[in-house]
Amino acid sequence: MSVRRANHPLGGGSVKIDTTPIRFNYTGTVQEYKVPAGVKKIAVDCVGGTDSGKGGRVQCVLTVQPKQVLYIVVAQALATGYNASDIRTSADDLYSRLIVAGGGGSCGSGTHVNYCGAGGNGGDLVGASGTSKSNAAGGNGGTQTAGGSSSANSGKLGTGGNAYNNGAIGGAGGSGYYGGGSGTTYYYTYMTTKRWYASGGGGGSSYTHPKLCSDVQHTQGFNASGNGWVIITPLEKK
């Protein structure tokens, strides 16, 4: 997995990384942040991506080591990719994530669908469930210990359940610490015509490391549209 180093402080310019906030936007690659010398705590504002459901937000203080390298993954907007944002200690290891902001689930869809349910919002310790339509159940949100359940495609560590295609398309679950489950579909026949229902996928859960994070604040459904972001502000220096 490719890694991009971010050296530009929020607002631009050539100021050294000390107590100046740095914003990481979506690039499609893992980005690198090196903790400045003498810094032992950083403030983090981590926001997940939005699909039909809105992305979650995590604000906290993270205890770090001076010159430690952290890897930043910023959410893309769509639940069909990884739409959570996170900070981790290993570029390719989901188990190394220290902070995660859950992404929103996608809506049910299909060109011939009569009724579609919205995706659930991402964020908080349990993501929101997708909207159910008739007997098409929305996917449940991811939790702290398991992916969101679904009778179609359940979520798992990191990612949501894939969109369920059964004549209509149930929404995909949002990514997160654990991803949301996909929505299901349902139809009945009325006067020889099928009427389709497609529900939304559940939102992904957020997460903070229980020992390294303090002053934690979760906001479910914070990001109204688009990709996520991560802002890091060093709190201490020499």
Image: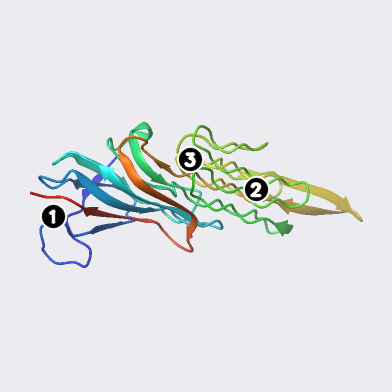
Kindly state the secondary structure of the residue where label 1 is placed: loop
Kindly state the secondary structure of the residue where label 2 is placed: strand
| Nearest to viewer (mark 3 / mark 1) | 1
Q: Residues within 10 Å of mark 1 (few under 14, many from 20)?
A: some
Q: Is residue 47 above or below residue 153?
A: below
Type of amino acid at the residue the image marks with label 2:
Gly
In this view, which residue lies farthest toward the right? Answer: 191
Residue drawn at (29%, 47%) of the image: 61
Kindly state the secondary structure of the residue where label 3 is placed: loop
Residue 106 % position (x, y): 57, 53
Residue 186 % position (x, y): 76, 46
Determine the CA span between mark 3 and mark 2: 16 Å
N-term mark: 2 or 1: 1
Residue holding disc 3: 159
Location of the N terminus (image quadrant):
top left
Type of amino acid at the residue the image marks with label 1:
Asp
* 19 vs 177, nearest the viewer: 19
Residue 33 % position (x, y): 21, 47
Report whether 209 appears left or right of 136: left
* 209 vs 170, nearest the viewer: 209
Q: How is the rendered protein coloured?
A: rainbow
Which dot marks residue 108?
none
Which dot marks residue 18?
1
Residue holding disc 2: 170
Q: Residues within 10 Å of mark 2 (few under 14, many from 20)?
A: many
Determine the CA span between mark 2 and mark 1: 46 Å
Type of amino acid at the residue the image marks with label 3:
Thr
Total numbered circles = 3
Residue 97 % position (x, y): 35, 37
* 215 vs 7, nearest the viewer: 215
Determine the CA span between mark 3 and mark 1: 34 Å
Report whether 228 appears left or right of 212: right
